[in-house]
Amino acid sequence: MNQSASTYRITDLAESERPRERLENKGANNLSNAELLAILLRVGVPGENAVQVGIRLLTTFGGLIGLHKASFSDLTSQHGIGAAKAAQLKAALELGHRMRDASPDERPAVHTPEDAAELVRYEMSALEQEELRVILLDTRNRVLGVETIYRGSLNSSQVRVGELFKTAIRRNSAAIIVVHNHPSGVPRSM
């Protein structure tokens, strides 16, 4: 079977269609997730260019959230992903997450349950055991912080009520929101 018929190298594309050049000329928001991954990966493997490797990773792990959830060894088990590329991917995902929290002057506000869920969804979706967290809010519902109160087992989490309020009192929080995850993916007790 001739693999070259179904694959192409990035250098086979017109320069204006290459991911790095498109990012430079059109901005990162105009690239697909696979193209952004290709820029991080830099090169492909025999039979797959970097974009195709990006597509394969996204398909294998179920998108960016799946890549975030994947362990380092899960990534390195993929053809063409060694320790260096796995580290680059994990670092880029973490930098993106940290960027959101980088500016204390632009603290997010929580006005709806979806706002609260969006605040913790990325990080908590990758957890393999239940955690109970408290979102601490000021008088204008701006986030002061998110504190992990308790780590439980795969399917349970118990905490003393006093633990919920201890951090809130110390941080002079005006309000709290209690959140927890379901590693099983089933949002109800069994």
Image (tube, rainbow, N blue to C red):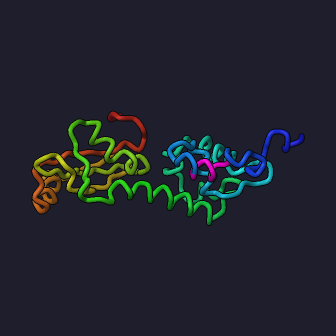
Looking at the rendered image, the quarter that the C terminus falls into is: top left
Q: Position of residue 53 (x, y in %)?
A: 68, 48
Task: Identify the residue shown where x is 63% and y is 48%.
Answer: 54
- Which quadrant holds the N terminus? top right
Left or right: 64, with 39 as reference point: left
Quarter of the rendering containing residue 186: top left
Rendering quarter of residue 172: bottom left
Q: Is residue 78 magenta?
A: no
Q: Which stretch did the figure color magenta? A: 18-24
Let me know if residue 52 appears in the view. Answer: yes
Q: Main secondary structure of the magenta part?
A: helix
- Depth order, front residue of 39/27: 27
Residue 179: image x %, image y %?
A: 26, 45
In percent of the image, x 69 and y 45: which residue is there? 52
Residue 149 can be seen in this image: no
- Residue at the location (73% across, 45% down)? 14
